[in-house]
Amino acid sequence: MRKIATLAAALTIAATAFGITMLMTPPASIAQPISSIDTYALTLKANPAMGENYDHH
């Protein structure tokens, strides 16, 4: 029983420390658009011509 209580105490301390760390200094994400992909060109290449047959299962 003592081992279970010690494990529970250790997990509680670790979870509390992790929570405090995330609240005080959350990780910063650096998001930016990828400008090297031309989505317009991809869209034109992806769409088949009107009336073109295609396999559908």
Image (cartoon, rainbow, N blue to C red):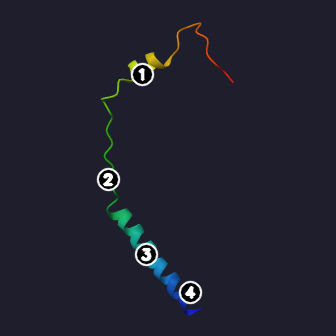
- Looking at the image, tell me whether mark 2 or mark 3 is earlier in sequence order: 3
Tell me if mark 4 has few (under 14), some (14-19) or many (20+) residues whose alpha carbon lies within 10 angstroms of its own. few
Q: Secondary structure at mark 3?
A: helix
Q: Which mark is residue 4?
A: 4
Name the front one of labels 4 and 2.
4
Which residue is pictured at 55% across the width and 92% down the height?
Answer: 2
Query: Label 3 sits on what residue type?
Result: Ala
Q: Provide residue 50's location: percent of width, then percent of height.
A: 56, 8
Q: Which mark is residue 42?
A: 1
Name the residue nearer the viewer: 4 or 9: 4
Q: Which mark is residue 28?
A: 2
Query: Label 1 sits on what residue type?
Result: Leu
Distance (Cα) linking label 4 and label 2: 36 Å
- Looking at the image, tell me whether mark 4 or mark 3 is earlier in sequence order: 4
- The residue that mark 3 highlights is 14
Query: Label 2 sits on what residue type?
Result: Ala
Tell me if mark 2 has few (under 14), some (14-19) or many (20+) residues whose alpha carbon lies within 10 angstroms of its own. few
Q: Is residue 22 above or below residue 49?
A: below
Which residue is pictured at 37% across the width and 63% down the height?
Answer: 23
Q: Residue furthest top?
A: 51
